[in-house]
Amino acid sequence: MTAIHEIPDAERRAEICAGVLRDLPDWFGIEAATQDYIEKAKSAPFFAAYGGDTAVAFIYLHVHNSYTVELYCMGVLARYHRSGIGRLLLSAAERYSREREFKFITVKTLADTHPDEGYKKTREFYLATGFVPLEVFPELWGEENPCLFLAKSL
């Protein structure tokens, strides 16, 4: 059984984030970006999934305004992919967001104009959990990494 916990301690959030992201070099292989995700985890609403005493996944949010929260970063240890943990974490983040009366949750990911297979699975996850694609920003992250912006009504 996987337990989901909100993590109140900033350093613990950063530690969990770093441990999971380091296990996912195909998604988080740009060191400067990974460091940025780890640092931002310290001040974000943050949930972790545990298998026993070990954090195996996390999700954290960025509040944009009183209407919109962004799924800013999420990671699941590779050996736990496709086990349902991502859905559990997303449900916890959505419940948190609804309780605070946000109207929308958004997420950015690599657009399908890029051939990366891992991100194809990421997009499939978001689509399967109710997100809809709104726009592609071809240069937000540079021409080599076109950004797909998705949203979901809460």
Image (tube, rainbow, N blue to C red):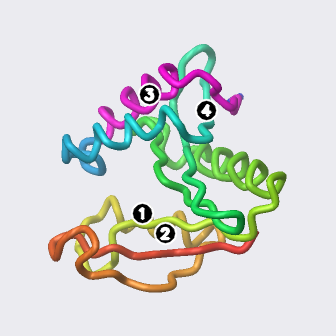
Query: Residue 49's mark?
Result: 4
The residue where tag 1 is placed is: 121
* Mark 1: few/some/many CA within 10 Å (<14, 14-19, 20+): few
The residue where tag 3 is placed is: 14
Inter-mark Cα distance, 4 to 1: 20 Å
Closer to the chain start, of discs 2 and 3, is 3
Closer to the chain start, of discs 3 and 1, is 3
Q: Secondary structure at mark 4?
A: strand
Inter-mark Cα distance, 2 to 3: 27 Å
Residue drawn where x is 38% and y is 26% of the image: 19
The residue where tag 2 is placed is: 124
- Labelled pair 1, 2 in contact (Cβ < 8 Å): yes
Q: Single out the mark in the foreground, 2 or 4.
A: 4
Query: Looking at the picture, does residue 102 appear above or below residue 140?
Result: above
Q: Single out the mark in the foreground, 3 or 1.
A: 3
Q: Single out the mark in the foreground, 4 or 3.
A: 3
Is 23 magenta? The answer is: yes
Q: Amino acid at mark 3?
A: Ala
Q: Single out the mark in the foreground, 4 or 1.
A: 4
Residue drawn where x is 61% and y is 26% of the image: 50
Inter-mark Cα distance, 2 to 4: 21 Å
Q: Amino acid at mark 4?
A: Ala
Using the image as rendered, state which of residue 93 and residue 79 is in the foreground: 93
Q: Indicate the quadrant where residue 98 lies.
A: bottom right
Q: Which residues are magenta?
A: 3-24
Residue drawn where x is 34% and y is 76% of the image: 111
Using the image as rendered, state which of residue 58 and residue 67 is in the foreground: 67
- Labelled pair 3, 1 in contact (Cβ < 8 Å): no
Relative to residue 132, is residue 81 drawn left or right? left
* Mark 2: few/some/many CA within 10 Å (<14, 14-19, 20+): few
Using the image as rendered, state which of residue 45 and residue 66 is in the foreground: 66
